[in-house]
Image (cartoon, rainbow, N blue to C red):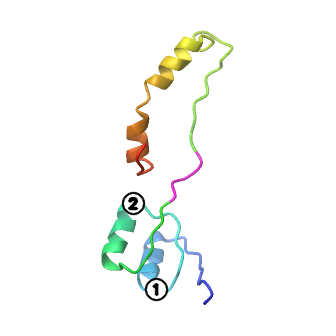
Amino acid sequence: MPLNIKSSPDDDVALEAMSAGKIDIMERVTLKQMQAMQRTNPEILAIRNPTTQAVTIQPRNDRVPFNDIRVRKAMQMALDLPTIAKDYYHRLY
């Protein structure tokens, strides 16, 4: 059976079409939308892949204070990686 793929700039229209079985794949689904859709349509297989793009801040490592490796290590240690993994990516660290 071929996949039915359509493009819709309106997320609400796409959600309705997905719930009605009129489309097979949908992008830009939030976690809450996915959970609600699974409650009302348990036959829908939902796979949420977080974006692979990230906004990064890259300090100039040739300038003070970032040319000191201890400063860069301290900045990395200040990040709560398990919480980021759990809350943003919805995965265990």
Magenta segment main secondary structure: loop
Give the mark count.
2
3 and 56: which one is in front? 3
Rendered location of residue 1, percent (x, y): 60, 90
| Residue sticking out furthest to the left | 39
- The residue at the point 35 percent across, 78 percent down is 42
Which residue carries the number 2 mark? 31
Question: Which residue is farthest front?
Answer: 93
In the rendering, at what x and y percent does residue 39 appear? Answer: 30, 74
- The mark nearer the N terminus, 2 or 1, is 1
In the picture, the quarter occupied by the C terminus is: top left
What secondary structure is marked by label 1?
A: loop
Q: Height in image: 20 above or below 92?
A: below
Asked if 69 appears above or below 18 in the picture, the reply is: above
Q: Which mark is residue 42?
A: none
Q: What residue type is labelled 2?
A: Leu
Q: Considering the numbered disc 2 on the image, is that residue within a helix, a strand or a loop?
A: helix
Q: Residue at x 52, y 82 (%)?
A: 23
Q: Name the residue under label 1.
A: 21
Q: Looking at this rendering, what residue extends furthest in the bottom direction?
A: 1
**Residue drawn at (42%, 40%) of the image:** 84
Q: Relative to the observer, which residue lies in front, 5 or 49?
A: 49
Q: Find the magenta span and give its range.
A: 49-53
15 or 84: which is nearer to us? 84
In this picture, is 44 found above or below 50?
below
Q: Name the residue type under label 1.
A: Gly
Q: Position of residue 32 (x, y in %)?
A: 35, 62
| Relative side of 67 to 45, left or right | right
